[in-house]
Amino acid sequence: MRETELDVVLTEKWGEGLVAVEAGETLELDARLESVHEGILVTGEVHSTYSGVCGRCLIDIAAPVEVEFQELFAYPGGEANDFEVQDDHVDLETLVRDAIVLSLPFQPVCRPDCPGLDPATGERLADSPGAASQEPVDSRWAALAELAAEPAEEPGETGQNPQNS
């Protein structure tokens, strides 16, 4: 069994979409390699930082990404394996890249309650919290909107003044 710590600088961007781990970012890798009957069992953690844009308001964001992984690198043989030991070495790049890319958020947000953008003006709603956007009323609902705007009558009132009766 061996334990190793590596700091690796990425030469290419990992991930697509709204966020990714950019080229030049450092990966901090802690790995434990154990010899087992079938091959080499690799268990570890990787830490880095992803960057991109918020999926709601499109501002730049950056956040840490931490991933745990475990995989068996099998000795070459008759069976097809995803990962194999090559000349008594294991190549962790594909394993670590897949673990990181799959852990990146699909719809990242700058904060959990991010209100997003105003659909009419395109401005960030978080910058102007007092300005609520007024959505246009569909003409088919105009009669219902007029009823909602009228003051409610008290129960038992008929609209007539009881003193005039």
Image: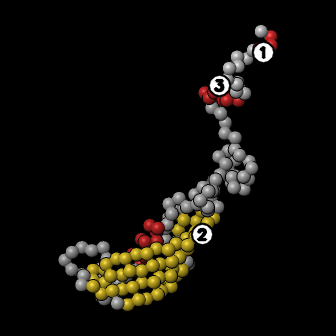
Q: Quadrant of residue 68?
A: bottom left
**What crowding class fits label 3: few (fewer than 14 Cα within 10 Å), some (14-19), or many (20 or more)?**
few
**What crowding class fits label 1: few (fewer than 14 Cα within 10 Å), some (14-19), or many (20 or more)?**
few
Q: Nearer the viewer, mark 1 or mark 3?
A: 1
The amino acid sitting under disc 2 is: Ala
Residue at numbered disc 1: 161
Q: Position of residue 116 (x, y in %)?
A: 63, 53
The amino acid sitting under disc 1 is: Asn
Horizontally, residue 27 falls left or right of residue 134, namely left
Mark 3 → mark 2, Cα distance in angstroms = 48 Å
Element under label 1? loop
Q: Position of residue 26 (x, y in %)?
A: 54, 80
Residue at numbered disc 2: 62
- In the image, 144 versus 13, the foreground residue is 144
Task: Examine the rendered structure and indicate whether residue 127 appears above or below residue 152.
Answer: below
Query: Which residue is at 78% across, 15% downward?
Result: 161
Viewport quadrant of the N terminus: bottom left
Q: Earlier in the sequence, mark 1 or mark 3?
A: 3
Task: Examine the rendered structure and indicate whether residue 143 appears above or below residue 55.
Answer: above
Spot the residue most to the left: 78
Spot the residue most to the right: 163
Residue at numbered disc 3: 143
The amino acid sitting under disc 3 is: Ala
Query: Which residue is at 55% across, 61% downward?
Result: 108
Element under label 3? helix
**What crowding class fits label 2: few (fewer than 14 Cα within 10 Å), some (14-19), or many (20 or more)?**
some
Horizontally, residue 96 falls left or right of residue 150, namely left
Q: Earlier in the sequence, mark 3 or mark 2?
A: 2
Mark 1 → mark 2, Cα distance in angstroms = 67 Å
Q: Is residue 9 visible?
A: yes
